[in-house]
Amino acid sequence: MSTPAEVLGPAERLLNVELVDGWVVTNRITRDPGCTGQSRSACYCAKKGDETAFVKAFDFRGEEKTRTVDQLNDMTAEFINERRVHEICRDNNLTRVTTIIGSGGVEVSGEVVHYIICEFAERSLRELHPPGEEVIAPAERLLALRQVTSALEQLHGASIAHQDVKPSNAVRHDGVFKLTDLGSSSCKHLPPAPHDLEWFAGQPAYAPYELLYAERGSWEQRRLGCDIFLLGNMAFTSFVGHSITYFVVGTLPEAMKPFGDHAVRFTEVLPDLVENHRQMIPEVVNVCVPAVIAKEFLELIDTMCHPDPQRRGHPKNILGSGSRYGLERYRSKFDQLAAIARKLSVAA
């Protein structure tokens, strides 16, 4: 059943509307299930001649007809932050992040809708490599993860943390996987966005444990360390079909789970998280990951997604003088594991 036009927000009524530089909105895009931000934006395709672009329209009204001045100011700040982060990516030639084409505001029924236009990606990693399904060759999964690692490496090099790395936010464009949806991102060179005040800006189902308990830590730990956890969680989810957070947090006693008023401190529950991880994750990996790479894959997940944020990061980075949250070694490891998995498939 279609929604009556009079109850649609202005951001949901952009069909056939002309945007900046002659781009015309052609059709609405259905977001992947579980995407964050679905209530704050609407997504479309736009055309200009033979070119196709992706449009993210910001819904400042949502389900309410009016919002307070503070709410509107926060939403405007979120739009500006996402646009500026995209512009920094473009200006620094971050080729593994979807490129911004334009942005602006258009009046719809007396209300201004702000939007961002980016290059169009065919499909997401979630669609192309359904998590946990055996039909996808392990080498393909690992090569995609290697490309996502490169994208995250580019962002970190520009002092940008994505903070919402997950299968639906990695998309394929011209045969290469890129990161998209910078709505939860933070840049060290920009004023803090309103979502920086939240305990976690992305989807809780993928979140690092400490952020579920509102344990913030330093900027590097909360931002870059968070991204490493999310990348490891993406790798785990790709092979297993569920997030590592689902396994480790889901089996805690109800009184220790991180939802509600955070009455339980992270330091109190950390020993239980470590024990759950130690008992459950090797068993799951050994079932879902090819035996020839299972040991090394588990070591990788242990360093990226360890429940204790102080033990997160590649061991050589932690002990050495380089960046604790550097990604180069992880990129190399995904390459190595892909090569092993590819030889296995050829031999079979």
Image: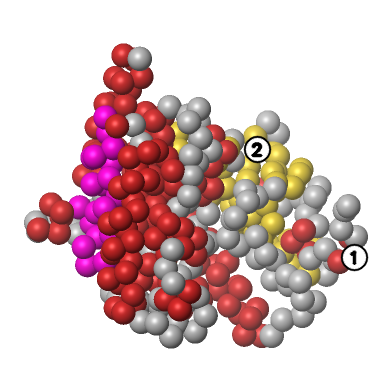
The residue sitting at 26% across, 66% down in the picture is: 308
Badge 1 crowding class, 10 Å Cα cut-off, few under 14, some 14 to 19, many 20 or more, is few
Dot label at residue 52:
2
Dot label at residue 53:
none
Nearer the observer, 39 or 154: 39
Q: Position of residue 198 (x, y in %)?
A: 48, 76
Q: Is residue 194 above or below residue 122?
A: below
Q: Position of residue 259 (x, y in %)?
A: 50, 75
Q: Quadrant of residue 149?
A: top left
In the structure shown, which secondary structural element does the residue marked by tag 2 occupy?
A: strand
The residue sitting at 61% across, 73% down in the picture is: 75
**Amino acid tagged 2:** Thr
Q: Quadrant of the C terminus?
A: top left
Q: Is residue 342 above or below residue 132?
A: above
Query: Would residue 167 be counted in the magenta stretch?
Result: no
Instruction: State whether residue 223 appears in this view.
Output: no
Q: Is residue 161 left or right of residue 48?
A: left
Find the magenta span and give its range.
292-314
Badge 2 crowding class, 10 Å Cα cut-off, few under 14, some 14 to 19, many 20 or more, is some
Nearer to us: label 2 or label 1? 1
Query: Would residue 296 be counted in the magenta stretch?
Result: yes
Extreme top residue here? 347
Q: Quadrant of residue 144?
A: top left
Q: Earlier in the sequence, mark 2 or mark 1?
A: 1
Q: CA distance from mark 2 to mark 1?
A: 29 Å
**Amino acid tagged 1:** Glu
Q: Taken as a whole, is the magenta stretch helix, strand or loop?
A: helix
Q: Quadrant of residue 272?
A: bottom left
Q: Position of residue 13 (x, y in %)?
A: 80, 57
